[in-house]
Amino acid sequence: MTTAKAYRKGSVFPPLEKGKLRLYSMRFCPYAERTRMILQFLNVPHEIVNINLRDKPDWFVERNPLGLVPVLEIDDKVIFESPICAEYIDEVYGDNKLLTKDPYKRAQQKMLLERFSKLPVGFYAGFRSKDPEELKKGSAEVNKVLQIFEDQLTTKYFGGDHPNLVDLHIWPWFERFELVKQVSGHEFMKEGVYPKLDHWMKTMYELPAVKACLTPTKDNVEFIKQYANPDVAIPDYDIGL
C-alpha cells in the first residue's frame, strides 16, 4: 500500500504489513525526497504513507515525537532523521553502496555533507524573507556552499562514476532552485557561474531514481507559495492529486 493523499489528525492508522518497509513522507519535503530517492536507487521494496505536517495524526507523532519526516518503520523498528534513515537503508539493503565502509572515506563523505548543511538556511531566505538584507545574507551563504561543491566535483558524480550518498542527499535543494526563482524571482544558481554543477545537474536529472521522485514543478511552486504565506494556516498537501 502506497498513499498519495496526506493523512491528517483523526485519520485511521493504516495497518502495517509484516516485513514490509514503510516510509512516512511528504510529497514536497526535500528531506523526505532524499529517502525516497535512496529507496528507489537501491530498489528497496517499500510503501509510502504521506503526512500532513501542519495537522499530524497522533499515531504519527507517537512514532516521531519531533513530528518530522522522513520516518521509516518496519515491524517493531522505527527510524527517523534523513541522514540516519539513509545510513540504515544503505547498510541493511544496499551493502554500503552509497556510504563506503572505509572509515576515512566515510568520514570524508560525512564532512562534505556537514558543509552542505549551511545551504538550507540561506535557501529558505530566498522565498520567505521580505528583508533585502536577510535575502542578501542567505544568498551569500548559499553561494559559499555552492562554490565548495563546485570545487569538490572532479568526477561525473561526487561518488565518482556512480552516485553516492552525497549526490542523493544534496540533490533535492538543487531541484528546488528553479522553484525559488519562480516564487520569488530570486536566482541562486545563475547559469554559467558553476559550470561543473550545471553539468552535474543535467546528469542527475537522467537518473531513474531522480525521475521517479520528481514532483510537477507547478505543484511544487503552488505548495511553496502556500507554505511561505503566513495567512495560510494549513497548506494543501494534496495539490495536484
Image (cartoon, rainbow, N blue to C red):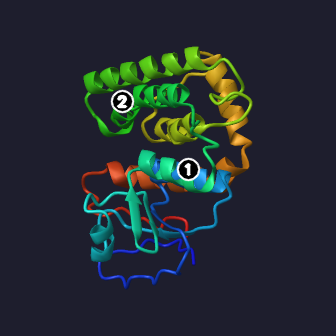
Position of residue 62 measured from the top left corner of the image (x, y, whole percent): 27, 71
Q: Residue at x 29, y 24 (%)?
A: 132
Mark 2 lies on residue: 122
Image quarter hosting the C terminus = bottom right
At label 2, the amino acid type is Gly
Mark 1 lies on residue: 91
159 relative position to 34: left or right: right
Tag 1: Cα neighbours inside 10 Å, few (<14), some, or many (≥20)?
some
Q: Residue at x 36, y 62 (%)?
A: 235
Q: Is residue 176 visible?
A: no
209 relative position to 215: left or right: right
Label 2 near label 1: C-beta < 8 Å? no
Position of residue 205 measured from the top left corner of the image (x, y, whole percent): 69, 41
173, 87: nearer the viewer: 87
At label 1, the amino acid type is Glu
Instruction: For mark 1, give the secondary structure.
Output: helix
Q: Can you say whether 158 is above or below 1 in the image? A: above
